[in-house]
Image (spheres, grey):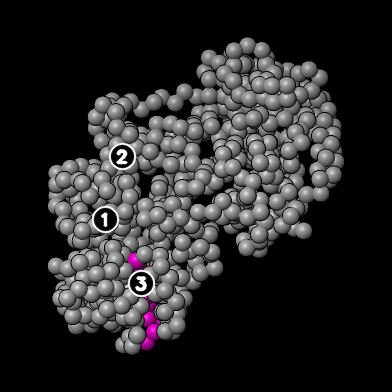
């Protein structure tokens, strides 16, 4: 981490309370997070509130994007980047800032060695250990890490720092054992919850737009927006213009479909004026829209929306009710 | 200092003329600093510097390259600012965005154009585009409805729309004044006895959601096919690039996949008229 700090802003997991971890700029020491952090990696690639451009004769300099390394992403987080990549990189319009951050950053993921009660990645057929989308992956074995190199960028870093590594092919079997164990434990936990199989989720949403469940569930929603702000696949934002000392600039602020004015147009019409419509919208977007567009659910099973909901709205319970 | 440019950066466009259409609607004539062209039906994001952006479909002839026009009804914060703008003022421009009207697929057909209120703005651009190759179309019927005679946009030129011999113009107002000699009633009252073969004809509709809803129903009742009804969907197009998420309509983003849709593409999506 110290060596990486020379070339990157390094963010590593830190305790924030007795059971949760979050990113913090690396200073010293290293804590391994056994499960996903509180924050999703989304904040690193599109900050919740940031200057995007200055325009016209703006003299606001382009901010240099300093390469960063983020440590402690889990398999669910890596999956979420596939969704974000689709939004910001695919099609006719490429978000250059996002692209640059994706290209210059270093992603150091790690296997889950435990899970939170709200975790249900396996239910969505996402394994609790990374298989793709990382530069380095760490598997916690015998007070050390078995490191897997996942990119050319990582290979170059490894070559420059070979003194820190030792070839231990013999530990691969240990890694597989540990991976098997976490799968078994998680499967046991999830089967006790009686979750709906992932292949049914698309049709369950599609066939239930008129289900009174949306209204019943939305009654307890307080519209705090925690689910959208903590979700790793949420990507919605609004552009906000400002003038300062005669210079114009445009910022980007995270927005989300659970807020009342999200879909409102200037004339006053609002296709998402009811909380029930907005709650349903979230499920349509994640389980219908993305499934139809790119054949992926925009849900990683990380459970952050469940963890953060003060009304205790639980996505897993919604699907169980729709399936009943 | 390198100039920042991204998909979110507006280019400059100067206001060269302002036309007062009605007490609540103005047309701004804009001259972009850089070359700009659009296909009829595509939209732009217009920036009031330092205050914000809003989407508009140009109302001018897409064949005119030097300047273009947007017709703006005062309905909210940003549109009110555009109404206060003066000639010579510089606004921001992003676009063109979205997909326009598929003109080539209209060739050889009878066309029905139905507009309501400020919804005539994109349709005027379409009418210009059609008129520039008028011989390609069998017949064009333009039906337009406004609240009162005072609320009719483009009063100074609307009569010109019926000049070509294969074009028929029908006007109506919801509420007449003492000088109004024409039809009184909502725009759907113009859609009876249309001299065209409705099962073959194409219709293009733009106006407030409620007007589009009743027009679509009337057209279906008159025998128009679902795939021959083109609608301009009004949603909260914010980034215009299919990224910000606001304008999702079923499996579409209105900004990227529209704003013009065939009724057949969107008819099964709930709340399309809201």
Q: Where on the picture, by quarter, is residue B85?
A: top left
For label 1, the residue is B72
Residue A36 in sight from this viewpoint: yes
For label 2, the residue is B51
Q: Which mark is residue B204?
A: 3
Marks 3 and 2 sit apart, C-alpha to C-alpha, by: 33 Å
Give yes or no for residue B201 being in the magenta stretch.
yes
Q: Disc 1 or 3, which lies upstream in sequence? A: 1
Q: Disc 2 or 1, which lies upstream in sequence? A: 2
Question: In the rendered view, would you say B123 is above or below B78?
Answer: below
The residues colored magenta run B197-207
Mark 3 lies on a secondary structure that is: strand
Question: In the rendered view, would you say A46 is above or below B244?
Answer: above
Q: Chain of mark 3?
A: B
Say whether mark 1 and mark 2 are on the same chain.
Answer: yes
User: Residue B226: image x %, image y %?
Assistant: 47, 76
């Amino acid at each position: 981490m110290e060596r990486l700090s020379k070339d990157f802003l390094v963010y590593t997991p830190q305790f924030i309370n007795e059971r949760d971890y979050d990113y913090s700029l690396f200073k010293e020491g290293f804590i391994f997070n056994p499960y996903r952090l509180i924050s999703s990696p989304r904040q690193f690639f599109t900050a919740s509130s940031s200057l995007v451009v200055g325009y016209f004769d703006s003299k606001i300099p382009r901010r240099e994007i300093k390469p960063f390394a983020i440590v402690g992403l889990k398999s669910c987080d890596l999956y979420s980047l596939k969704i974000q990549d689709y939004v910001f990189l695919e099609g006719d319009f490429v978000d250059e800032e996002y692209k640059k951050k994706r290209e210059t950053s270093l992603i150091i993921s790690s296997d889950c060695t435990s899970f939170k009660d709200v975790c249900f990645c396996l239910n969505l057929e996402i394994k609790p250990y990374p298989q793709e989308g990382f530069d380095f992956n760490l598997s916690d074995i015998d007070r050390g890490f078995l490191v897997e190199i996942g990119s050319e960028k990582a290979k170059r870093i490894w070559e420059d720092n070979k003194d820190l590594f030792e070839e231990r092919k013999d530990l691969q079997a240990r890694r597989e054992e540990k991976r098997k164990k976490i799968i078994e434990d998680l499967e046991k936990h999830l089967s006790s919850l009686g979750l709906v199989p992932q292949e049914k989720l698309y049709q369950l949403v599609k066939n239930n737009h008129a289900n009174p469940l949306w209204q019943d569930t939305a009654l307890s929603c307080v519209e705090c927006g925690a689910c959208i702000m903590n979700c790793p696949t949420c990507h919605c934002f609004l552009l906000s213009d400002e003038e300062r000392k005669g210079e114009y600039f445009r910022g980007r602020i995270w927005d989300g479909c659970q807020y009342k004015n999200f879909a409102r147009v200037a004339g006053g019409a609002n296709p998402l004026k009811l909380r029930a419509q907005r709650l349903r919208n979230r499920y349509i977007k994640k389980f219908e829209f993305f499934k139809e567009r790119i054949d992926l659910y925009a849900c990683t099973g990380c459970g952050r929306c469940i963890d953060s909901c003060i009304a205790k709205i639980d996505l897993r319970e919604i699907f169980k009710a729709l399936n009943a | 200092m390198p100039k920042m440019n991204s998909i979110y950066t507006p280019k400059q466009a100067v206001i060269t003329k302002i036309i007062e259409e009605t007490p609540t609607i103005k047309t701004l004539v804009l001259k972009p600093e850089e070359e700009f062209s659009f296909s009829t039906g595509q939209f732009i994001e217009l920036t009031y510097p330092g205050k914000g952006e809003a989407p508009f479909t140009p109302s001018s002839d897409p064949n005119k390259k030097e300047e273009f026009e947007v017709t703006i009804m005062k309905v909210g914060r940003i549109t009110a600012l555009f109404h206060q703008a003066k000639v010579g003022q510089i606004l921001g421009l992003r676009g063109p965005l979205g997909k326009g009207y598929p003109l080539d697929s209209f060739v050889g057909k009878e066309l029905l154009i139905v507009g309501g209120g400020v919804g005539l703005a994109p349709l005027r651009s379409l009418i210009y585009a059609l008129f520039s190759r008028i011989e390609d179309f069998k017949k064009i019927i333009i039906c337009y409805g406004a609240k009162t005679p005072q609320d009719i946009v483009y009063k100074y030129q609307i009569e010109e729309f019926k000049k070509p011999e294969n074009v028929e113009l029908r006007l109506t107002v919801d509420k007449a004044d003492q000088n109004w000699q024409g039809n009184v009633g909502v725009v759907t009252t113009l859609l009876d006895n249309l001299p065209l073969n409705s099962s073959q004809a194409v219709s293009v509709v733009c106006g407030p959601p409620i007007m589009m809803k009743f027009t679509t129903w009337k057209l279906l009742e008159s025998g128009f096919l679902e795939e021959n009804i083109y609608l301009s969907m009004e949603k909260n197009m914010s980034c215009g690039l299919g990224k910000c998420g606001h304008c999702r309509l079923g499996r579409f983003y209105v900004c990227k996949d529209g704003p013009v849709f065939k009724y057949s593409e969107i008819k099964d999506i709930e709340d399309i008229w809201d």
